[in-house]
Image: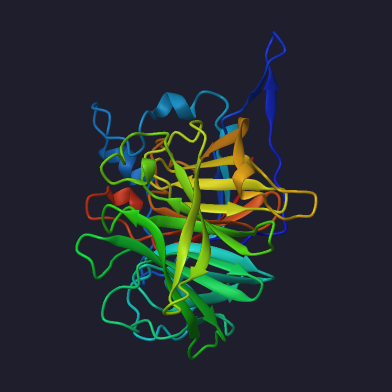
Amino acid sequence: MALVADTGATSSAATTADGTKQRRRVALAGVITVAVCGVALAMSGSGGSLMAARSAERPRLLSSGKDEDDCNSGDYRKRTLKLAYEVPMVSLFRDMKGQRKHEASDVIKVDDTIYAVCDSSWAIAKFSDTLPPLGWENTLMGDPRRESDDSGYEAIVHEAGTFYVIRESIQMTERDKFHAIIEELRDLSPKNYTISKQCPSEFEFEGDSKGFEGAIAVRDLDFEVVMLGLCEGNHCSEKKKSDKGHGRIVAMKKAYNSTDGSCEWKTIRTIKIPKSADFKDYSSITMDSMDRVAITSQEDSQLWIGNLNGKTPSGLWDIEAMDFDNDDYDLYDFPKNDQCMTVYCNIEGIHWINEHMLIAVSDKMKKSQDFRCFDKDQSVHVFTLP
């Protein structure tokens, strides 16, 4: 999933009458939206026509616990992300290589270049951070139809010249055994890329739909790469996925079998995400140079920002000491429409651009979702913090 960007992030706090410092719950405002992995979509409005069709009965809201009073409370601006700009992903590329859908699942920024993956494609999307439509430098690297099945790519990470892409949860040869597959890619070019390694995770999932949904990489005290995989479901589980506020991150380190030379990402430990990230699901993760971690929820259309502890003065990480500061966090909403309804329904990737801005990508809307989700799906977005 996400590359550790050299950025920082600011936070705000309020002081109560008794001197207690409290974090403000903030809503993210979109800055950039681009369809990264989507089909050529016509953007449809979600405003006035809806008002005309509205009856005395309040329409079904797409985000839990939200209504018009929430948007009119006076602090909407302080707790909502601001959209800077956005584009459908399909608008970026001159050569689509026959790819007709762009179910974007993660995004990272390396220098001035954006890389994104889609769980529907084996190609790696590369485009300028200015998001120019039909830009000559924008390209899909590799064959979107490398294999007959969809890629299942849910995360992309860059560390020391190597790209890691993570397949969420794949059924292995043993019956009912599901593990993530981490591919290491090199020599990325407009035509292709080289797969240097494919290693499964030791961590086992209950099925193929609630595996790793994002990731970041750090270096441990031995200067070896440790992958921090974000579980989509609460408790890293499909059975307990609805038990909100129990997010988990799995720390893994690659090991080799001395007998046959095979590789596996061995589990070091599981890290709890604070309950202040009270989400139904966890869709992406990124960390900046100030160790500020941002985690998104697709179902709740929210962004949580908190501090990860465990970095030593040398810049290396003590994995056993890793934990989050439970008392220091911010919670933001992605922008609503003019009736305070969720329109950013499918945020699946997030990455810091700088200390005030983040880039995000959206998956394809689901058949069960309201029509309001269509306008923003399969797109790239840029947001600023309030």
Q: Position of residue 294 (x, y in %)?
A: 57, 47
Q: Is residue 61 above or below residue 217?
A: above
In the picture provided, is 261 more to the left or to the right than 169?
right
In the picture provided, is 346 more to the left or to the right than 226?
left
Q: Is residue 223 above or below residue 57?
A: below
For the question of whether residue 146 can be seen, the reply is: yes
In the picture provided, is 173 more to the left or to the right than 23?
left
For the question of whether residue 375 can be seen, the reply is: no
Q: Quadrant of residue 377?
A: bottom left
User: Extreme right residue here?
Assistant: 313
Q: Position of residue 187 (x, y in %)?
A: 57, 86
Residue at the spot 52% in from the left edge and 88% down from the top edge: 190
Q: Position of residue 225 (x, y in %)?
A: 61, 64
User: Extreme front residue here?
Assistant: 259
Q: Is residue 296 above or below residue 219?
A: above
Residue at the spot 48% in from the left edge and 75% down from the top edge: 258
Front in this rendered view, residue 307 or 7: 307
Exactly how many numbered labels are in the figure? Answer: 0
Front in this rendered view, residue 153 or 356: 153
Residue at the spot 50% in from the left edge and 86% down from the top edge: 194
Residue at the spot 56% in from the left edge and 73% down from the top edge: 163
Front in this rendered view, residue 187 or 143: 187
User: Extreme bottom residue here?
Assistant: 191
Q: Position of residue 322 (x, y in %)?
A: 61, 43
Quadrant housing the C terminus: top right
Colour setting: rainbow
Front in this rendered view, residue 58 or 169: 169
